[in-house]
Image (cartoon, coloured by chain):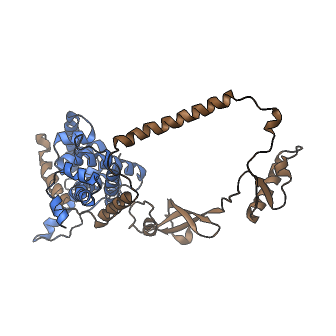
Chain colours: A blue, B brown
Amino acid sequence: MSASSSLHDEPDAELVRRAQAGEREAFAEIYRRYHAVVYRFARMMSGSPAIGEDVTQDTFTLFLRELHRYRPACSRISTYLYGVARNLTRSALRRNRRFVGLEIAEDQEPIASSNPANALERSRERSHLRRVIAELPSRYREVVILCAIHGLPYADVAAILGTPVGTVRSRLSRGRRIIAKRLGEVEGRPNAVPRRAARCVV
Amino acid sequence: MSHESEAWIDEPLKALAADDARVRVPARVQGAVLREWDQHRALGKGRGARTPGARLAWIVVPAAAAALLAVAGLQRESAPLAAPDAALAPLGDPVYVSPIPDSLSQRLGAATAVAASSVEGSAPPPAMAAPSPGYVIVPEPLVDPGGLHVVRARMSRIALATLGVPIVNPDLDGLVEVEMLVGDDGVAQSIRHAALVNEPWETGRER
């Protein structure tokens, strides 16, 4: 426990160095720092919590296998992990294309509010927004998730995707336009988008 | 970043981001990752970057092997040709005679019959034409590959997932069709996911 608390403030590069030297707790700390963003990214990209779990596990498994080659000076851990998760998610979606869309991740938290009707409505809106994002072509979906949901700077997203910053900007703009159009189309008609249409396009 | 006409979607996106930030990763994922770490370390892999000595070994060892092969090839070319009869001389290596398992014997018999019938009017090769009953001469000890049978079965998704087969959403209801390699001893050697089962078990197609 004391080892883990001492690692809490260590910079990523130091954690990598110690993990490369075989320190299990250092690797566990890297996992603790980044597993949530990897999972949330894969989950929203795929619309499937199960794929999110698989991708998270595979991403860190790959990372530990390639740990001896990883150089913190070349790229940040988050950039590396996001990049791996992105590739694994795309592979998983290609492999399981026929399954995708059958299980859009719904809000799982119980509604606890002084105004349950409003809370329910907000929950429906979020579910609908999730579906609209899941319908986006993957090149727009990943940018919307990374920029608008995860709040990453353009430069970081560009490094993750391996594209120029200008491309990130244009894809985000296009993705937002599609979302606005689809949300606007169904305003007042919450079920206008059929569930079957919520199929991810890789 | 955003056009004025789309600015109204910022609010829903922020709400979704806040909602998404509360998502928790199941603890079993961390357990699986750390188990993988332990196994990886136990196998002695990933002990840091290769040292210069190790890198040198990767270059020197193959180069030495290539040099040895080249020398051996040169010696063979420079050696005088043996007399034709020498090629027919008995080999120094012993010839093993192994008993054939009954199942393999039957298969060999059937294969001989098929071979003979497929080449009408020509005698089958001597080795196939007259195998001594129950024995066959082979250049090394006969290793029966073992009778492996593909057995198709149906099982729940969760049961398949617990066997280590990657499957989408193992918690979902329904059966999956699997193929198992089962040995003669009845022990399943391996398993793979074949297909999803859409129809109930009772009305499943003939397997």
- The quadrant in which residue A76 appears is top left
Tell me how many marks there are: 0
> Who's the residue at 25% across and 50% down the image?
A133
Left or right placement of residue B121 versus residue A96 in this view: right
Left or right placement of residue A22 versus residue A180 in this view: right
Residue A193: where, in percent of width, then height?
A: 29, 53
Q: Which of A116 and A102 is in front in this view?
A: A102
- The correct choice, above or below, for A199 with respect to B182 in the image is above
Quarter placement of the N terminus of chain B: top left
Q: Which of A14 and B115 is in front in this view?
A: A14
- The quadrant in which residue B166 appears is bottom left
Q: Nearer the viewer, residue B196 or A56?
A: A56
Left or right placement of residue B63 versus residue B141 in this view: left
Residue A52: where, in percent of width, then height?
A: 31, 57
Residue A17: where, in percent of width, then height?
A: 24, 50
> Who's the residue at 10% across and 41% down the image?
B4
Q: Which of A119 and B182 is in front in this view?
A: B182
Quarter placement of the C terminus of chain B: bottom right
